Image (cartoon, rainbow, N blue to C red):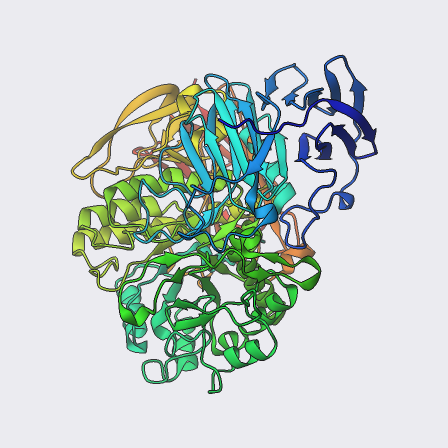
Amino acid sequence: MIALPQPGTLQRHETDERGVDLYFETGRVRISFPFEGTARVRFTPSDSFAPRRSWSVTPPEESLSPVPFTAEETKEGFALVAGPLVVSVTRDCRVSFADERGERFAADLAPPTWGEADIMDTVIREKDNDDWPAGRARTEVRLKKVMPAGEGYYGFGERIGLLDKRGRIVTNWTADPESGHGRGHDNMYQAHPIFMALRPGLAWGLFLNCTWYSRFDVGATRWEELEIVANGGDLDYFVFYGPTPAGVVEKLTRLTGRPFLPPPLWALGYHQSRWGYVHEDDMRDLAREFRERDIPIDAIHFDIDYMRGYRDFTWDPERFPNPARLLAELREQGIHPVTIIDPGVKKDLGSDYTVADEGTAQGMFVENPDGTPFVGYCWPDEALFPDFARKDVREWWGRQHAGHLETGVEGIWNDMNEPAIFDRPFSEGLSTQLPMPLDTPQGDEDERTTHSEVHNLYGLLMSKATHEGLLALRPDRRPWVLTRSGFTGVQQYAAAWMGDNSSWWEHLEASIPQLTGMGMSGVPHVGVDIGGFFGNASGELYARWVLMGTFYPFMRTHTAMGTNRHEPWSFGPEVEEVARQAVKLRYRLLPYIYTLAHEAHRTGAPILRPLLYDFPDDPATYHLHDQVMVGPHLMVAPIYHPGKEYRMVYLPEGAWYDYRSGEKFEGPKPLAVHAPPDRIPIFVRGGAVLPLGNERSSTSRPLIELTVEVYPAGDSEWTLIEDDGESLAYREGAVAETVVRVAEQGDRTMVRLEARAGGYEPHPRTLVLSVHTADRPELVTLAGEEQGGWTWDDTRRALTLRWQDDGQAHEVELRRQR
């Protein structure tokens, strides 16, 4: 084995207000602190670091306020202390971290090494490697860190497999797997070089700031070693000291961008889609069926069939002769139209297709190294691809959506944006996927690079172009974009679905750790195709999937052309009823889910998360991939095997209530739970305040009743967040926040709803307070006055009291018999 070069010994150092530069015999390290609890480590084998790019997903260092730190030269090397974080660098260039208690983590096993990238790794290259650029693309840096026993590794974005990724090699390169999700597919549609490590008492995270190809060997080669490999010539990573999972995600999204402004409320409702709705009558029939069958719906998606010959931003004149009238009809029924847009623009020049002509004339498309247009095959056969690494191209692309918005489109669905390119014309039959040649030039002239550096960013930058374009065209409306491909930072611009899954029980199970992994990677608005995209779901599988899909942040049924229909009524009346009640529950939960969306926008907190996120000191949660928390208050545990009606559920420490029966349990304990075909086990955490709305056919209907379900367990509080669900007025304070406080003292339970704060006034409504308590109360008072209008549900062990919601403070006290 050829020995790779190492930095050698420390020669000198320089300190400034932001950090320390350490110069070794070969190479340079810079340690800086973007904000408290976060350290940035940069290493280059040369004297200078690679320049920052305009498309970087992290802010420029000079835009951040300096974090106070101390730097002390020691016998071993250097020690830097910034708030709770201690960074040590040895004289032979090994970096380690510790907290104030001296708890070490993320410690280097050896100095970094570098050399020519392994040409046998064909993940990102064509067979002959002719398009593999010289220079930085061929240089990789390697670093090994210690993996302590008992430490789990989570996140890594979109992955197939269980929750803890220890023991795997994880590569970061966006791709369109030809057969959809599979255990053998590591590279998928999204690339998120981010992970969280967790052991009792400590959570920390690492973001590899590398848009080139990279990979993590998470103990696959050696169980106790983490190896980081980054192409591009430098090593640049951020370490986040939690010390909790919530702290890691907050710091990650503070660095790479908070999740996009709270989505329009309709986007959190139910979406229906199919590749194969080929005529406007299909859409009318679909809307009519949902309304007649009393199944709520908020969005219908138009797949590629609506276009004229797969030309972006067009409508087929025969099958969709009057799209404006069709979309107006849908909107009148409270249904929001969403249209797919692919990056591949049909190479139809000199006709009436202005997108291709205008884009070519203005130089908006990617070119080959010789200056000729790059042409790749996609749905429209020969296609041109916008160079989204350029700001002017993104602005131009955003403007192309004007016609769709004028027609009545309300959301944009970005697909095929890895980018996915076929190896031959679509019209010639099945094709395999190829990457865009890696030596293809991209970016503005002053930072011209090759596709090898920006490949992973293509979906993110397309999403950014679409999001900002919609916002510019409709400055008073929140944009909503759905994307298949993305990179860390995409959470600022789009929701994401996980691409082409299959109608397999295994993929229902896989969706749970897949989506929670995305949430822990900073992307909270995620979902998978309910029922599966490829293949045909059975009625039992669809029913179990829609029960779980009720709790996905993005809830959509979608399936492929040539498969059986997957509308909720496609499997007979029994399954239809399961779907109807599941979707109705989703709409009842919207006040809670919408509040979680606001919290995600403020702190990055994932909506759907594994139990370890909320119970990080309980090792029993570290491998629980098939139970999830929905926000801090709900836990769901789906059935994901055919013919099963029972499963074990683990209840962490504290009080838990069965959502349907109201029965109270004390954790930690395992619990055998019955889950008949129409039920998914749902538990509410003790201390929870759960806001529920009335049933609605869509979010276009006003909320006329708000139920506040209270599950006492000592003292607790929670804040309900509301706004108009559509405009940007929340930025100017048009938000309503209602703090609910719960206290228990002996035989008394007090619930106080504070006066509503903020500039938003909800629609007139009834407020229903429901308090779960073991015993029927003897006395109930509101504002100190005894109440006689309350009811008691002996089955759910809950008291209910109603009044007109006036936004004022109200205090209810329940007194039980001694």
The image quadrant that residue 618 belongs to is top left
Q: Is residue 767 visible?
A: no
Q: Residue furthest bottom?
A: 351
Q: Residue furthest front?
A: 2
Closest to the observer, 714 or 197: 197
Closest to the observer, 389 or 276: 389
The answer to whether 594 is drawn above or below residue 273 in the figure is above
Q: Position of residue 397 (x, y in %)?
A: 56, 70
The answer to whether 619 is drawn above or below residue 758 in the figure is above
Closest to the observer, 671 or 322: 322
The reply, left or right, for residue 90 in relation to residue 594 is right
Q: Position of residue 265 (x, y in %)?
A: 49, 57
The reply, left or right, for residue 671 in relation to residue 191 is left
Q: Residue at x 33, y 62 (%)?
A: 273
Q: Position of residue 539 (x, y in %)?
A: 18, 50
Q: Is residue 94 visible?
A: yes
The image quadrant that residue 112 belongs to is top right
The reply, left or right, for residue 468 in relation to residue 484 is right
Q: Residue at x 36, y 67 (%)?
A: 303
Q: Position of residue 674 (x, y in %)?
A: 23, 31
The answer to whether 401 is drawn above or below residue 13 in the figure is below
Closest to the observer, 92 or 106: 92
